[in-house]
Amino acid sequence: MSLPVITATALGLVVSLVIVAITAMGFFQSKNHMPVEGRTVLLTGASEGMGRSAALQLAAKGANVIIVSRNVGRLEETLADVKAAAKSPSTQRFTYISADVAEHDYAARVVAEAMAWNGGSAPDIVWCVAGMSTPLLWAMDEGSMAASRRNMDVNYFGAAEMSQAILREWLAPENSTSPQAEPKHIIFTASMLALFAIVGYGPYTPSKWALRGLADTLAMELNLYPDNPVRVHVVYPGTITSPGFARENQTKPAVTVELEKDEPPETPDTVARRSIQGLEAGKYFVTVSFLGELMRCGVMGGSPRNNWFVDTVLGWFIPIIYFFVLRGLNATVLRYARTHGHPSTYSTKK
């Protein structure tokens, strides 16, 4: 999804905040808060799109990589590419595990297999990338509720179950180290739609908002384990040119296409690279664009901040921008309704 072209007035305000935003996005960050060389990373949804790109880039940084997906054929192809991207092929290790993240209790098996392969040790970093999107109009499309349940199973419960399975290993008393030890990392993949919702994503957006709620809860709960340091992160990509994007376009309402027309999709490699940069900068909420960063500051609520001062200052100004943006969005939807009539008459695309 995207925020449409911002009005001239709002854009002027954004430009005045560029320097502050650059600081917020961590371009002057020097310390790597998520080193991966010699560590083991497990990624779900890693046979295509952003997950695949992230696996290749982490291998190039020296990580041992475990990729998880349903399709064994694509996993084998991706694994070969991951091996080819390795920084130190003679010392790094790679494997795949076939699993469907929507299946109940899948995560315990995946973690057990990963630990058996990894000499009895749990992966150091787990990145839940697997996801899907089924855009539909909520009220009038008969398939919207079934699609919502499926989206929730894959996007939310798939990630939630994996987080619980890996945290039970990381936080076990026998795995206590010290507050100064290199932390483990659990990474959720949400969406810019969890920062700013638009029409057409009723079955999808709630599943990504739910990840925000789980992440905020875990960020506080993990304080109960000072000797088992774990960091939580949420990545917020926008539109990605991936097979998943092609699939979601099969059901996307035309009004949604109209609202998104001004956002250029990013390649999986670009989104993965920017996500990893944000993780290395130690960010809790990781956005992959300037627009995403502004949207993040507008909906922080009780979530942990990347930078308390900058996030607060931007949070004062974003509502002013949203005043113009929401007027434009709602005007577009109203024009669409006047032109195309009652939504009960719409085909999948109109």
Image (tube, rainbow, N blue to C red):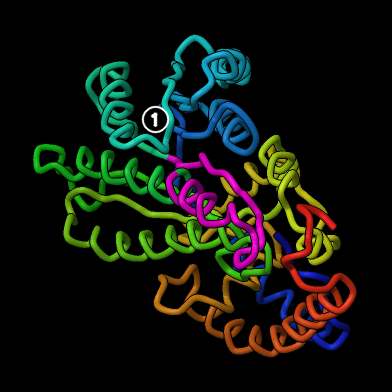
**Mark 1 element type:** loop
- Write the residue at 58% across / 26% down: 47
- Whether residue 105 is visible, yes or no, is yes
Which region is colored magenta? Answer: 127-153
In the displayed structure, 289 sits above or below 36; it is below
Q: Nearer the viewer, residue 223 or 209?
A: 209
Q: Choose top left, top right, bottom left or bottom right for residue 317.
A: bottom right
- Write the residue at 40% across / 39% down: 126
Q: Choose top left, top right, bottom left or bottom right for residue 48.
A: top right
Q: Which of 231 and 70 is in front in this view?
A: 70
Q: Identify the residue at the far top of this view.
A: 90
Q: What residue would you read off at disc 1? A: 39
As drawn, is 206 to the left or to the right of 317? left
In the displayed structure, 5 sits above or below 110; it is below
- Binning the other alpha carbons within 10 Å of mark 1 as few (below 14), some (14 to 19) or many (20 upward) gives some
- Whether residue 281 is visible, yes or no, is no
- Where's the C terminus, which quadrant? bottom right
Q: Identify the residue at the far left of this view.
A: 173
As drawn, is 45 to the left or to the right of 216? right
Q: Indicate the position of residue 4 as horizontal and vertical percent values.
A: 80, 70
As drawn, is 93 to the left or to the right of 116? right
Q: What residue type is labelled 1?
A: Arg
Q: Is residue 151 magenta-colored?
A: yes
Q: Indicate the position of residue 168 as horizontal and vertical percent values.
A: 20, 42
As drawn, is 247 to the left or to the right of 285? right
Q: Indicate the position of residue 324 as horizontal and vertical percent values.
A: 77, 87
Q: Is residue 257 magenta-colored?
A: no
